[in-house]
Amino acid sequence: MIKRRKKLLWIIPAVIVGIAVFIFIGGEVVMRLWNWLLPMLFGWRQITFWQAVGLLALCRILFGAWGGRRHYGPGHRMAARWAQMTPEEREKFRQGFRGRCTPFEPPDASPSA
């Protein structure tokens, strides 16, 4: 019990320092890339460090996960459904999918002489 408390007392400051370092490095990278590229390419104004941190947080919220892999969404449901299909059902699905997604027939497999 005492060892666990000592370990927690060491981990908590390390996590806080790690988060601060991540925010600092991420903000600096975003700010420097923005200020290097976008004003020159598009005529946009330069941003401050705190605006870069806000932009980084916004992008993480909109486009990324805050940690770990998340196993849900349309791909996960399809994988579970696919695993439950019989080989005949899978082939039927493939044929239906090919009919909807390709407007032309696949190339002829026989070699032309």
Image (cartoon, rainbow, N blue to C red):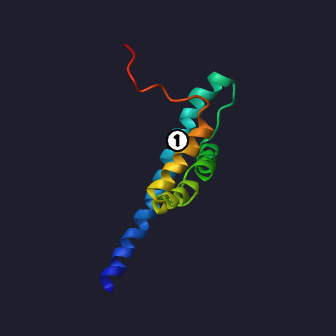
Q: Nearer the viewer, residue 12 or 63?
A: 63
Residue at image location 54% in from the left, 50% down from the top: 93
Question: Residue 1, relative to residue 97: is it above or below?
Answer: below
Question: Residue 43, relative to residue 27: is it above or below?
Answer: above
Question: Residue 96, relative to residue 103: is it above or below?
Answer: below
Q: Quadrant of residue 65?
A: bottom right
Q: Quadrant of residue 96?
A: top right
Q: Amino acid at mark 1?
A: Glu
As drawn, the residue found furthest toward the top would be: 113
Q: x and y percent of residue 49 in the render?
A: 59, 43
Residue at image location 40% in from the left, 16% down from the top: 112
Mark 1 burial class by Cα count in 10 Å: few <14, some 14-19, many 20+:
some
Name the secondary structure under disc 1.
helix
Which quadrant is home to the N terminus? bottom left
Residue at image location 69% in from the left, 24% down from the top: 43
Residue matched to label 1: 28
Q: x and y percent of residue 26 in the render?
A: 51, 45
Q: Quadrant of residue 104?
A: top right
